[in-house]
Image: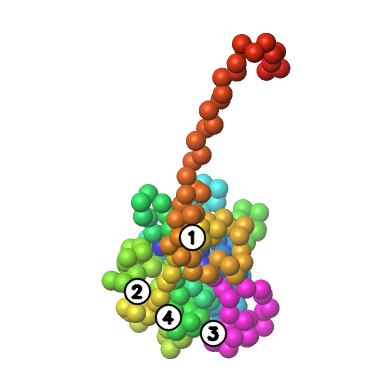
Amino acid sequence: MCGRFVITSAPAALRQLFGYIEQPNFPPRYNVAPTQPIPVVLAENGARHFRLMRWGLLPGWVKDPKGFTLLINARSETVLEKPAFKRAIRRRRGLIPADGYYEWKVADGRKQPFFIHRADGAPLGFAALFETWAGPNGEELDTVAIVTAAAGEDLAALHDRVPVTISPRDFERWLDIRGDEVDAILQLMTAPRIGEFAWHPVSTRVNRVANDDDQLLLPISAEEMAAEAEAAKPKKAARKAAASSDDGQGSLF
């Protein structure tokens, strides 16, 4: 799955890569989390556009968002059948600019976070599906989910799912919704090639959404991981010392 990601490339560089006409200026983000507004690139009226959408898709048929499960990911194997995604995969496909994402690997009963990025350091575009949810009072909310696929042999060492990344040469094909056919884009919803991505362990500071700084991306050593694991252990309750009453001194407690 993909539950946190990073956007660090300069806005001008992302605009050039994705080709949208707007000129947004936004700061780097090192710990983007679900429910937050995130950038989405889409095709509309013959041009590419940049929009902010809430990460967590709400299908149009949802009546009460409070009772609906947050859909931050969409499994590529079932998007054609799932009610929440089967319309979006045909008519509302987008790209989410990013520079990497985080994944957690369970080891010795503890979740160790890793930062995963392209081995060549280039930005990437997550395959995304979006919907505009309309509320009973006329309010509208643009929402989005990241498409995932079964992990390849290398990335499976961290997690069995990975976000689908679309190559720049396939941006046009993925965003093209002029027809209602999906055969041309089905082959794009696959895991990255072996060796295309690299990763390293990072501090558990990334676990807190409030932490959003460039230090989150730094590799940590085995010694630092051990220190964080030790610090995370539950503290044993201090034993209360029995008060002595044979010294003739009174006690306030």
Distance between the alpha carbons at the discs numbered 4 and 1:
24 Å
Are the residues at dot 4 and dot 2 in contact (C-beta closer than 8 Å)? no
Q: Residue at x 49, y 41 (%)?
A: 234
> Which residue type carries mark 3?
Phe
Are the residues at dot 2 and dot 1 in contact (C-beta closer than 8 Å)? no
- 10 is within the stretch colored magenta: yes
N-terminal-most mark, 4 or 2? 4
Q: Residue at x 58, y 88 (%)?
A: 16
Q: Which residues are magenta?
A: 6-28
N-terminal-most mark, 4 or 1? 4
Q: Residue at x 54, y 60 (%)?
A: 206
Residue at numbered disc 2:
191
Distance between the alpha carbons at the discs numbered 4 and 2:
15 Å
Q: What secondary structure is marked by label 1? A: helix
State the residue in front, 15 or 245. Answer: 245
> Which residue type carries mark 2?
Ala
For the question of whether residue 17 can be seen, the reply is yes
Distance between the alpha carbons at the discs numbered 2 and 1:
31 Å
Q: What secondary structure is marked by label 2? A: loop
Residue at numbered disc 1:
224
Crowding around mark 4 (Cα neighbors within 10 Å: few <14, some 14 to 19, many 20+) is few
Q: How is the image coloured?
A: rainbow
State the residue in front, 212 or 46. Answer: 212
- Vertical relation: 37 (above or below) 93: above
Q: Which mark is residue 119?
A: 4
